[in-house]
Image: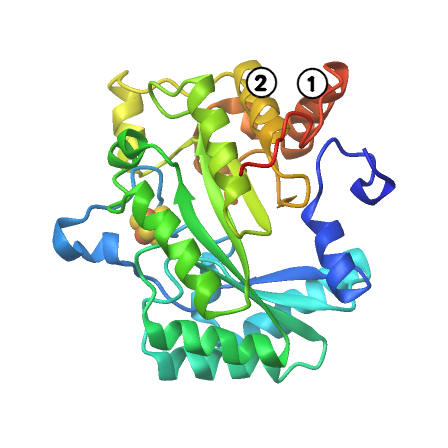
Amino acid sequence: MTEFWKNNPYYPVSSQYQSIFGEKVYKVPVTTVDDCPNRQGLKGMETCVFCDVWGSAAKAESLDLELQEQIIKYKAHIGQRFGAKKFLVYFQAYTNSFEKVSTLRTQFETAYDFKDVVGLVIGTRPDCLSPKVLELWEEFHQRRHVFVELGVQSFSNRDLEFLKRGHTAEQSIKAVHRIHKNTNVDIGIHLMFGNPGETDQEIIESAKICSGLPITNVKIHNLHVLKNTPLEKTYFEKKFTPIELGQYAHRVQIFLEQLRPDISVHRLAAFASRWDELVAPKWTKDKMKTHQFIVDFMKSNKSQQGLLYTEQT
Ligand code: SF4
């Protein structure tokens, strides 16, 4: 464990940001879209089973505000709370490449109008990447810094079908390589653990796949049940049991042990942005307690990220 990891058994994304920007940088989440291919039912797709009406937005109420107003409001809030001076504007909710390129360009320019915004974080899906979108990302990356976060969720097609993601694991892998080949943006992927039928071996395989990809960061979370989602119905029909905290901590550990040590990690578990919408498991309600449990679990096992990582040839 290096000092750079800030006493964590993993490489935190805050350290990656610090190494790029030379100081602490904070994300400002914004909401500019309220739709995605799944919700539109394109090509027979369905809403992802875990997705609430807010499309994973931290602050969906922001849709009532202009983008510029959102940035001013949340920058002020974060600045006051953490003494933050540099920011990344995080296009988080829904699918942020499912929009006209001209509209995306205007949004990115609005973000770059703020001198203390050092870059963008763009959340999207692996199957929603036109050549024009990639060109746009690269253009804005040349000016400041662009991070793209792909909702991969799983490298098991069984899980992806259960989650109703509407894309395959192969498409996700291809998407990462395509972005890497055509741009210099930082690529991150989101993964979910706790899917039905999931095994330790599958988690280890996922870590090995991640380690072989040209990515710089991952976000891992447990599959939790939120109100008004398809998964809520499945849960109440007793067809889905959320993963227990102990088992989840074990999965996080075995994943991180196989993960390349230079891939930064955003967070260790899911957190419901609107706490009153969480149905199960209850242990995700306390963000700090859950985080500490997993960190303590790994430390007590003398485990850390990359412990079992071996470079694949
Ligand atoms: S998780 Fe993303 S892709 Fe899936 S339904 Fe929600 S907004 Fe759409």
Specify the quadrant that holds the N terminus. top right
Q: CA distance from mark 2 to mark 1?
A: 8 Å
Q: Amino acid at mark 2?
A: His
Lateral position of residue 151 relative to residue 302, left or right = left
Residue at 54% in and 22% down: 251
Mark 1 Cβ and ligand 1 under 8 Å apart: no
Q: Do tag 2 and tag 1 residues touch (Cβ < 8 Å)?
A: yes
| Residue 108 vertical placement versus 88 (above, below) | below
Residue at 42% in and 21% down: 242
Please rate how many residues cluster around mark 2, counting C-alpha atoms within 10 Å: few if below 14, some from 14 to 19, many from 20: some
* Near-viewer residue (311 or 37): 311
Indicate which disc, 2 or 1, sits on the residue closer to the N terminus.
Answer: 2
Mark 2 Cβ and ligand 1 under 8 Å apart: no
User: Which label number is shown at residue 250?
Assistant: 2
Mark 1 lies on residue: 297
Quick one: SS at disc 1? helix
Percent of width and height locating residue 158? 27, 29
| Residue 65 vertical placement versus 278 (above, below) | below
| Residue 185 vertical placement versus 72 (above, below) | above
Residue at 26% in and 28% down: 233
Residue at 38% in and 48% down: 173
Residue 68 seen in this snapshot: no
Residue 112 seen in this snapshot: yes
Please rate how many residues cluster around mark 1, counting C-alpha atoms within 10 Å: few if below 14, some from 14 to 19, many from 20: some
Figure quadrant of residue 75: bottom right
Q: What's the coloring here? A: rainbow
| Residue 94 vertical placement versus 32 (above, below) | above
Q: Amino acid at mark 1?
A: Phe
Quick one: SS at disc 2? helix
Lateral position of residue 136 relative to residue 302, left or right = left
